[in-house]
Amino acid sequence: MTDAVIVSTARTGLAKSWRGAFNMTHGATLGGHATQAAVARAGIDPARVEDVIMGCANPEGATGMNIARQIALRAGLPVSVPGMTVNRFCSSGLQAIALAAQRVIAGEGDVYVAGGVESISCVQNEMNQHMLFDGWLKEHKPGIYWSMLQTAENVAKRYEISKETSTACSPNCARRRLRLRASSTTKSYLSRCSPVSPIKPRAACSRRKSR
C-alpha cells in the first residue's frame, strides 16, 4: 500500500474578523498565496499537482464559485490543474487533507494540494438567507440548523461537562499557543501575505453597525 505524507506546509497569518488586516482580502488571494508557498517549499514542478482540494465552511461570496479552482489559478498553477471545494463546516480543511491522502493511498495520483480557506470578514455577514431552512428538517431535526453555541451547550449537557472544566481549558490553550509562537515551528509554516485594501478598524465596525 502506498504511504501518503505531507511534504510541505504554508499558511497566512491569522487576523481578527471584520477588524483585521485581511478584512477585505478575497479567499482566492489568501488561499492562492498559501498554495503557492507550499508548492515552492516542496520544490516540485507545479504541473505535477493532480488536484487542489480546499475545505471551506461557507463556500459562497468571496469564497464561492469553486474557490479551490480559483486558488489553483491564483497560486500560478497551470490551467490543467483542477480544483475541488469541500464543505464539512469546521472540519472542512481537515476533510480536504484526508481526501487527498486517501487518493494517494488508492493510487489515483501522487501530488495533491489540500487545506482550508475562510473569510469570516467577507462572507459571514453577507450570506444568502433565501430559503435557508427546509420546513421538514426545521420541524423534525432542528439541531441540524443549530449554531456552534447551541451545539456546545448540548454537548456539555449530554456529556456532563461543567462550566468550570470548560473554563480550565482556556488558559491551557493560551499557554500552548504562546509556546508555539515562541518556537521555530510557527515560522516554518507561516508565509507573509500582504492585505488587499484593508478597512480601518473603526470604519469596519461602523459599517457593521449601520446594517
Image (cartoon, rainbow, N blue to C red):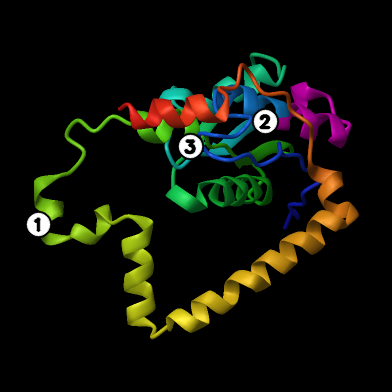
Closer-to-camera residue (84/13) = 13
Q: Residue 38: horizontal and vertical position, in percent?
A: 78, 35
Q: Residue 155: horizontal and vertical position, in percent?
A: 37, 73
Reply yes or no: does residue 41 show up in magenta.
yes
C-alpha span from label 3 to label 2: 29 Å
Magenta stretch: dominant SS?
Answer: helix
Amino acid found under the numbered disc labelled 1: Glu
Query: Is 50 left or right of 123, judged from the image as shown?
Result: right
Q: Residue at x 80, y 54 (%)?
A: 181
Note whether 187 is above or below 154 in the view shown: above
Give, as a single range, the part of the protein colored magenta: 34-50
Earlier-in-chain disc, 3 versus 2 = 2
Quickly name the residue at label 1: 139
Which circle marks residue 86 in the picture? none
- Quarter of the image where the C terminus is located: top left
Q: Residue furthest top?
A: 79
Q: Residue 40: horizontal and vertical position, in percent?
A: 84, 29
